[in-house]
Image (spheres, helix red, strand yellow):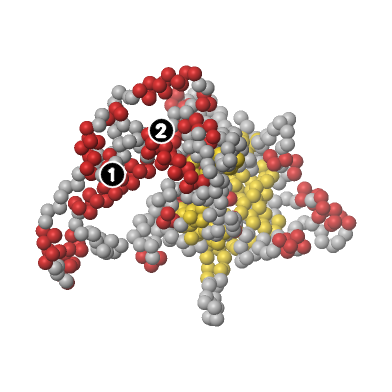
Amino acid sequence: MALPLPSAHYACLCSSSPSPALSSRRASHIPAPPQDDNSEQSTFNPHSPRAAYNLYPLTHLLFCDECSQIRCPKCTTEEVTTWYCPSCLFEVPSGSVRGDGNRCARSCLDCPICEAPLNPISVGDNGPEEEYALRCQYCHWSSADAGIRLAKPTKLTEQLAKLRRARVEGLSKLQEDDEADAARVAETDVSSLQPRNHDDAFGKLTAFYKEQLSESSDAPNPYGGSNYNSPANLARIMNIYGGLSHSALKRSREKPQPMREAYSLSEGVTTFPLDGGVDEHDIVRKMPGLAWDELASVQQTIIAPVNGDARFTNDLWPVATRLRTKRGKRCKICNQIVFRPEAKPGSTRTKVRMLAHDHIPKFALQPLSAAARPQDPAFVVGKDQPYVEPSLRPHATQQYVLTISNPLFETVKVTLATPAITPGKVKSRVTILCPEFSIGPAGEMWDDALSSSTTSASRPEDGSRKAAMASLTGGEDSERQPEAGKVWEKSRNRTKVILELVPGALKEMSIVPKAANAQADDDLGEDEDVLQVPIFVRAEWMAEVSHPPGGKPEPKELREIGYWCVLGVGRISG
């Protein structure tokens, strides 16, 4: 169980029922979800393997007011609302995110060792010109160890790009863009080629393949965003309604040239020797004399393309800070927004937040007897006070108080339904003494504190000393007896009912010996000795219909919601 016992989990059956195919984003074109008449009649089994993917705490669930259903993380879709840098909190346009490699293009740099922010410090003490280096305040890595020194503490990204370009161009003498040098490049021995700039090679490959695509394909389609972006469909429509000019007709009859692959350095190709150069042997001979921390790990080399060829920590370059996102969530069925944060990077507020905690009745379970109430794990301070789960004695009737709270500002009628015998290998009996009741509307927090509407059927309200002591100590509750069809206690937006449980035995005693297969079936799995009570909840209330400003208010409409709630009571003792 994810929560300490007693607990309450809520079921979202999206993984058990197939979702309808969405043919359009418009609400009028969304097909209605298939109604399964047996979904409410069939009992939810909390011990089945699929139940682990359906049960969630209430704090992990959202609510869709269009569908009037609970939404879990699996039945919602995420969408990115904002890209921003966590260091400078600069909001990056979505169009430039891919071009910048999902990293900040400003002077925000991270340590290649521990990914902590880097700060420029002055290291120029041997000359008139002051020099700067980047230093990590966490692992004390410095760019001066890699031979990277900057002229000024601003525009760090531009200075690093110039240093990187100058170092790469100084090593490689074969990066020529002239087609006249293609023959000389082809005759050069491949084993003498030096490492090339990653960004430069990528730019040349991109330009080459764009040119090949433009030469080998037809004329570009000016209606690429329409539903007729197929060349065949567009040609047929143009022949019907407009016709083609002579030059366009001649070009369309020409056979397109096949697209070829890049084969030269000027087109972005990088070749690698098969047997490994002298540099690889030098690296292997150098490794035994270094410590483990001086070797670059796989995570450090793949964190950015600039460090892809690094073998030692001294070869690592500072890495631009990766961007973060703010994400919203939509319902998969109706595409309704259920959660959306504010677009400002520094803001923690939300524009839309449809939490299930604020839209469905909440459940809480505790023993009726104060002496049998379990220890709250939140108050366990030391190791000498371990949390002990409540244990249940088999075949002993126990009574629990089930508290249902109403977060809505309308009166809610609640109907509870539970099987008489719990599903699973351990059969326990469950009885709800009052399955139908109503809960008052919620109000402000001060109303709960100052309200005196909490009533008890047996507590005297004559203002006597006995009534005052009963209200403070709850002594009168010990003399009360639960009655069928009656609410145990009722307040303004909270109702308590009695739940009677008779835990079953873990092993049934039988005189007749069982076969080996039957004994294997009786073996209990993980958490099958935990008494879990599935309860189907149906809530109905009258909600106000939204109307335009100044319009005539419409009468209230009936709304209802049904869902499964699983109450974890305790572990049955053997």
SS type, badge 2: loop
Q: Which amino acid does label 1 sit on?
A: Asp
- Residue 186 is at least partly visible in this image: yes
- Residue 420 is at least partly visible in this image: no
Residue depicted at 30% across the width and 36% down the height: 174
Q: Which mark is residue 262?
A: none
Q: Quadrant of residue 389?
A: top right
Q: Tell me where residue 169 appears, x and y as whole percent.
A: 37, 38
Q: Find disc 1 in the rendering and name its residue.
A: 177
Q: Tell me where residue 487 appears, x and y as whole percent.
A: 67, 57
Label whose residue precedes the other's in the sequence (2 or 1): 1
Residue depicted at 23% across the width and 54% down the height: 214
Q: Quadrant of residue 30?
A: bottom left
Q: Residue pushed farthest front?
A: 128
Report the quarter where the C terminus lies: top right
Left or right: 449 with respect to 545?
A: right
Left or right: 546 with respect to 210?
A: right
Q: Tell me where residue 208 appears, x and y as whole percent.
A: 26, 47
Residue depicted at 73% across the width and 44% down the height: 369
